[in-house]
Image (cartoon, helix red, strand yellow):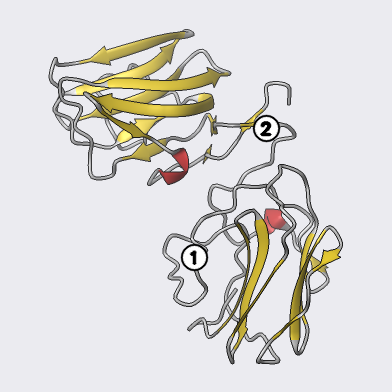
Amino acid sequence: MANANQQDYAVLQVQGGRLLLSCDLGKGPAHVTLTTPINDGLWHTVKAEFSKKTVMVSVDGTESDRTPTKGHTLDVEGKLYLGGLPATYTARRIGNVTHSLAACVQDVMFSGVRMNLSAALSSHAAGACFRRAQSGSFFSGSGYAAFMKEGYNVGSDLTVSLDFRSTAPDGVLLGISSTKVDAIGLELVSGQVNITNTFCVSETKNPIYVGGYPADVKQNCLSSREPFRGCMRNLRVFKGHVSDVLDFSAAFAHPHVFPHSCPDTAA
């Protein structure tokens, strides 16, 4: 949270696996942290507290030292962001907090009032937490991930490698297509993996779509528009000796895809 020029701000974040509070009450920045690691996959209760002259944080009841502040009042306006910042937000003074939090959050209290997270003014790629999770990216069956916004040229030599598990017999795995006919498609059809390529040399210049694709996009080598439902990980594309690792959290679009975890098969 911050005011318009970020002269006053407060940011609570995880940095290097530790809790860090950075703030400025208008007369100079202050920082306070705890060495207790909180990136261990367990639930933790964290707190940030502002008083007239000091700030402090705590993890599971263990408090940091109180750090003096140069101001007395945190004068902020606008929205309170939880878990990340919009892509259009310009972080001028609040530091490198552009990465979203890959974690679960519950029981948020602000000035003694419990926040109703289901009534947020807006949300982006925020979904339910899994009772038991494992590595990978979860596709809900209604979205897709898009890579290489400037376009990807398949050419004559391409290898695609990925791990997946699906809860549906049909679904798009990957599609790359030109505006004409050149394309390559990888999909599940009746529980079987199908791959189709229209030309020996595919002159594609469009993005790589994984797990589905937008309604206004045409894919020449996919037999259906059925989005993938399940989990994917370790997606790589190889051209000759060059390989690209496609990180779902770095996709330029990933609606209804949760890039940081998948539900365990036993969940």
Q: Which residue is drawn at 59% across and 32% down?
A: 135
The numbered mark at residue 256 is: none
Q: Residue at x 59, y 92 (%)?
A: 27
Q: Residue at x 24, y 26 (%)?
A: 241
> In the image, is residue 244 above or below residue 165?
below
Q: Quadrant of the N terminus?
A: bottom right
Residue 51 visible in the picture? yes
Residue 106 as seen in the image, left or right of residue 229 = right
Percent position (x, y) of residue 258? 55, 39
Percent position (x, y) of residue 230? 55, 25
| Helix, strand or loop at mark 2 | strand
200 vs 161, nearest the viewer: 161
Percent position (x, y) of residue 229? 53, 25
The total number of labels drawn is: 2
For label 1, count other residues whose C-alpha is less than 10 Å away and answer few (under 14), some (14-19) or many (20+): few
Q: Which residue is drawn at 68% across and 61% down?
A: 19
Residue 185 as seen in the image, left or right of residue 166 = left
Residue 211 visible in the picture? no
Dividing the picture into quarters, in which one does residue 263 lie? top right
> In the image, is residue 46 above or below residue 263?
below
Residue 200 as seen in the image, left or right of residue 262 = left
**Marked residue nearer the N-terminal end (1 or 2):** 1
Q: In which quarter of the image is the C terminus?
A: top right
For label 2, count other residues whose C-alpha is less than 10 Å away and answer few (under 14), some (14-19) or many (20+): some
260 vs 240, nearest the viewer: 240
The numbered mark at residue 96 is: 1
| Helix, strand or loop at mark 1 | loop
Give the alpha-carbon distance from disc 1 to disc 2, as whole Å.
28 Å
145 vs 225, nearest the viewer: 145
The numbered mark at residue 133 is: 2
Q: Which amino acid does label 1 sit on?
A: Asn
Q: What residue type is labelled 2?
A: Ala
